[in-house]
Amino acid sequence: MMKKMGAIVLSLIFILASVSVSHSAGKQRQITGKVLSVDAGTRTITVIGRKGVVTVSAIEDTRIIVEEVKAIDDIKVGDKVTVRYSQAEDRNIARSIAVRAGAK
């Protein structure tokens, strides 16, 4: 009986921890458009798309996709990008930034 109760308690703790982590990650969003600005110092880019302007922060885990673009410093104003991001705390966190090859 105690083993069963312990398993239930551990399960509940795991479920609550999972909900907490997924809630803090926020809903994943996406914007496709042109890069308006890049700030390598703060590791942010601002993109304008059909739904407006979004500024996202690139973190260490952010994937930047395109053969010649390897870092936030390689993204230039005017590049066409698709950014997948989520809201966390007081900023948007980029999960991936796809730069269209040769697109300006």
Image (spheres, helix red, strand yellow):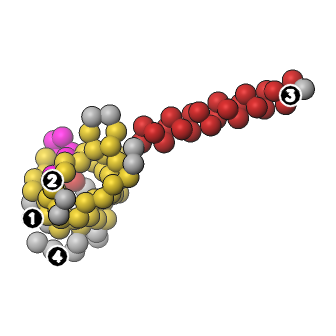
Which amino acid, mark 2? Val
Residue extending furthest bottom? 102
Q: Amino acid at mark 4?
A: Gly
Q: Nearer the viewer, mark 1 or mark 2?
A: 2
CA separation, marks 3 and 4? Answer: 61 Å
Q: Find residue 103 and report its horizontal and vertical position in percent.
A: 15, 74
Dot in front, 4 or 1? 1
As helix, strand or loop, the secondary structure at mark 3 comes to helix
The CA span between labels 3 and 2 is 54 Å
- Residue under the point 64% across and 35% down: 14
Q: Is residue 39 left or right of residue 29?
A: left
Please check the rendered image and state whether residue 49 is part of the magenta-colored stretch, yes or no.
Answer: no
Nearest to N terminus: mark 3 or mark 2: 3
The residue singled out by tag 2 in the image is 53
State the residue position of label 1. 78
- Residue bearing the label numbered 3: 3
Answer with mark 4 or mark 2, whichever residue precedes in sequence. Answer: 2
Say above or below: 1 vs 46.
Answer: above
Q: Quadrant of residue 104?
A: bottom left
Mark 3 is surrounded, within 10 Å at the Cα level, by few (under 14), some (14 to 19) or many (20 or more) other residues, namely: few
Amino acid type, callout 1: Gly
Density class for disc 1 (Cα within 10 Å; few <14, some 14-19, many ≥20) is: some
CB under 8 Å between discs 1 and 2: no
Amino acid type at image mark 3: Lys
Nearer the N terminus, badge 4 or badge 1?
Answer: 1
Task: Name the residue beneath numbered marker 4.
Answer: 102
Spatial separation of the CA atoms under disc 1 and disc 2: 14 Å
- Magenta residues (range): 40-46
Residue 19 location, x and y as percent?
54, 38
